[in-house]
Amino acid sequence: MYERKIKEDLDCGIVVAMKVFGSKWKPCIIDAIGRGIKRPSELHRAITSTSARVIDMQLSELMAHGIVTRKIHAGFPLFVEYSLTAVGETILPILEQLNTWGLNNKHILDTPEENGATGEDAFLSNKRTPVSSIC
Amino acid sequence: MYERKIKEDLDCGIVVAMKVFGSKWKPCIIDAIGRGIKRPSELHRAITSTSARVIDMQLSELMAHGIVTRKIHAGFPLFVEYSLTAVGETILPILEQLNTWGLNNKHILDTPEENGATGEDAFLSNKRTPVSSIC
DNA sequence: TCAGGTACCGAAAAATTATTCGGTATGGCT
DNA sequence: AGCCATACCGAATAATTTTTCGGTACCTGA
């Protein structure tokens, strides 16, 4: 018989942030909306690494947490537009840092072996890649 | 019969960053080591929201990715000390931002219902909490 | 009425991640 | 030898997240 022994600690800001936008695709979706890709069909086309269903689900979670809002444009053609809330906007600079870090350090995931024990090599080889993500 | 249809896209820095330190406990571990909590037994005591096994496993992944190094102090008492590599250090400012964001917005996870559609209320109620996490 | 675009959702399966339990090994102390 | 503290690991299970498949519904123009 198993029984969960450990309760969550929501007093840690990092834990909170990871719960709100730390899933596999939410950062990419927030990033895309921040770049002006706002319609579901556009998002589905822009984020090709996952399925439309996933994007829809994550969008509704983001909406439930007040990160994005949904506006229905009636008329024709009927379409929907997601936008970042004021809170959602505050996530963008963090995503930019995450993206920069990832681009500068993507070699880490290249070869499972060969990790300079000191990390100095990796540090020196940083390229300071300009920011731009297309997940 | 299922068959994976979508391949990963490691050209997105955000995806890379999330893979390297985006798991449930890695940010807390990196944060703790950055604060000088370096011995496994210390980490186990400091991070009470998860088990020792998890911390050990995550540490070895962080080591494989060149984020931390392990030093064995022989003699008595024999003990182990983990330290951040130069690359690992570059993660700290990002964690600080994540923590600040989470502390400022933890109310988001409070009530599953009641989300101001605009997010303005949440924005105005931000407290700009000073940074400090004890996961 | 039918095709085509848009937006969405339910449910099952798969994949991933986290957790628990029960070990091993080393060295010092009594 | 027995006990304690340290550090670590294997394997089964649980929990969570992601993915797939197969739908519904609405509106328009042909």
Image (tube, coloured by chain):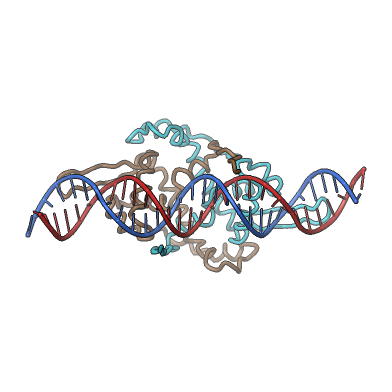
Chain colours: A brown, B cyan, C red, D blue
In this rendering, the answer to whether B30 lies above or below B11 is above
Tell me: C29 left or right of D5: right
Tell me: C20 left or right of D29: right
In x, y percent, where is residue B132? 58, 38
Tell me: A100 left or right of B58: left
In x, y percent, where is residue C25? 79, 59
**Where, quadrant-wise, is the C terminus of chain B in this rendering?**
top right
Please tell me which residue is depicted at 38% across the width and 58% down the height of the picture.
Answer: A50
Seen from the viewer's position, the closer of residues B44 and A107 is: B44
In x, y percent, where is residue A124? 57, 64
Give the mark count.
0
Please tell me which residue is depicted at 50% across the width and 37% down the height of the picture.
Answer: B103
Seen from the viewer's position, the closer of residues A14 and D13 is: D13
Seen from the viewer's position, the closer of residues C17 and B22 is: C17
**Where, quadrant-wise, is the N terminus of chain B in this rendering?**
bottom left
Seen from the viewer's position, the closer of residues C10 and A35 is: C10
In this rendering, the answer to whether A60 lies above or below A124 is above
Please tell me which residue is depicted at 39% across the width and 33% down the height of the picture.
Answer: B113
Q: Looking at the rendering, which quadrant does residue A6 occupy?
A: top right
In x, y percent, where is residue A24? 44, 53
